[in-house]
Amino acid sequence: MKSNTMPPVEPMTRTLRSGPDAEPYPVQAHHLLCAACVRGGCKNPPCGPAMIEKLLDVLWSYPHVPLRICADTEVVRVHYRKLYEKRGGRFFPRDFKERKDAFAERRKDLEVCRLLGIYPNTVLPAYHAYQILFSRLRTLEGMCRGLSGDTSVWPECPCSGEGFYERIAGTAREISYEEQWKRGEQLAGEGIWAIIRPRTHAEMKGEKERSAAFIINKAGRLYIRPNHLLCILCTRKMEVLVQDNLVELRMRMEADPDIPVTLVEGCCMVCDPCNVYHAGEHLCYSTHPKNILRDLRMLEILGLPPGATLPARRLYKLIFDKIPDVKTVCGWGDGSNTSPFWKPCADYQSAAVKDARKEGFLQSG
Ligand code: SF4
Ligand code: SF4
C-alpha cells in the first residue's frame, strides 16, 4: 500500500493491536508529523518511507492504538567531563554517538511531547495524540523548518517547505458527530481522518436501523450508561438524532416508564451507530476514560453500583432527587479543564436537569 493514497475503508473489527492488553506501539515523537507529511504527499521522509508506511498502517488499523511517544532524554546523562575530557563517570549508553548526534531530531521529538503536554515516552492513544497535535501545530514553522537559519549545523528536512504537513494538519477542523455520521468514509483524507479511519456510512446507517428498531420494538430491558441518562435530558426536545440512539431510548421510556434500565459502565445502547464507536472493541475512542469517570461519578452520587437495574421512572426520580445539574457530572462540578481528553462537555452549564425536573419527565402516572 502506498501511504499517501488513502487505504480502503473497512468495517471496524478487531486487530492484533486493538485488544485491551495490547502492547503500546513505540514511535519517535516527530514521526507522528512525518506520517502526516506522507499522507500530504511526501515520498521521502528522512527516516525512510517504509518506517512511516508501517506507522500509518498501525494508525489506520485501530483509532485507539496505544502509542508510546518517545524522545531520547537519556543520552545526555553521560557526564560532560567523561564526554569532553575522557575522565571518569558512567559508561556510555548503547549507540551513543548516533544518538548524541541526533540533536536536531531530539529537539523535534521534545517539541512534539511539549505540544502534546506529555512526559517523553508516555503512552497516548493515536486518536488523542492527533487531535491534540493538529489543534496545536498547524504548520511546521519552528519545527522542521528550524529556528537557526543555518542549516549547516541544524539541518532542515528537505520536505518541510513543500506544504505536505500543512495539507493535512492545516485543514483540520472540529466535525460534529452528525456530520461524521452523514459523510462516513468521505471524511477520509481530511485532517485527522487522513490518519484515523472513519466508519463507513453504510455501516453506521445499518447499525442505526438495526439498533433503533430493537430499542423501539423489541428490547425488554434497556442498557444505558449513567452519563447518557443526562444526555437524554439535554436532548429531550429533539425528534431525530441520526448519530446515536438517545432519542429512541427516550421515546421507549416515555412509552413504557417502568421498563427496567440496567446501568452499564462504558458504551451502551446509545452508541451503536456512532462514528467514534469501535464496534469490534466495544469502545468509544473519543471519550473513553472521560465518560467512564462520568459514569462512576454519577453512580456514586446515586449510591448505585455498575449493573444496578431500576425502572426508568424510579431512576429519573433518583436523578432529580440527587443530581442538581449536569455540571455536577459533565463539568466535574467546577468546570475544570485539565487536558483536551478531560475537558467538560460543551453543554455542561445547561439547565436540562432543572427543566426536566420541573416538567416532571417520566414522573406522571
Ligand atoms: S518535514 Fe518534518 S515531519 Fe515532514 S517528513 Fe520532514 S522531518 Fe518529517
Ligand atoms: S459515548 Fe462515544 S460512542 Fe457513545 S454515543 Fe457518545 S460519542 Fe458516540
Image: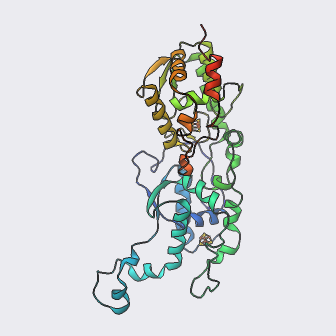
Between 42 and 292, the residue placed more toward the observer is: 292
* Quarter that holds the C terminus: top right
Q: Where does the N terminus fall, quadrant-wise?
A: bottom right
Q: In this view, does 153 lie to the left or right of 6?
A: left
Image location (x, y in percent) of residue 112: 55, 65
Whether residue 143 is situated above or below residue 228 in the rendered picture = below
Residue 73, position as x, y percentages in the image:
42, 72
Residue 246, given in percent of the width and then of the height, sits at 62, 28
**Residue 225 in sight from this viewpoint:** no
Quadrant in the picture for residue 207: top right
Is 200 placed left or right of 296 in the picture? right
Residue at image position (54%, 60%) is 116
Q: Is residue 344 above or below residue 238?
A: below
94 above or below 296? below
The answer, for residue 294, to whether it is visible in the render is yes
- Splitting the image into four quadrants, where does ligand 1 fall? bottom right
Task: Using the image as rendered, state which of residue 177 and residue 61 is in the foreground.
Answer: 177
Q: Quadrant of residue 274?
A: top right
Q: Which residue is drawn at 71% across and 63% down?
A: 167
The residue at 29%/83% (across/down) is 89
- Colour convention: rainbow
Residue name at image x 42 percent, y 25 percent:
304
Instruction: Tell me residue 197's x, y (percent).
Output: 60, 49
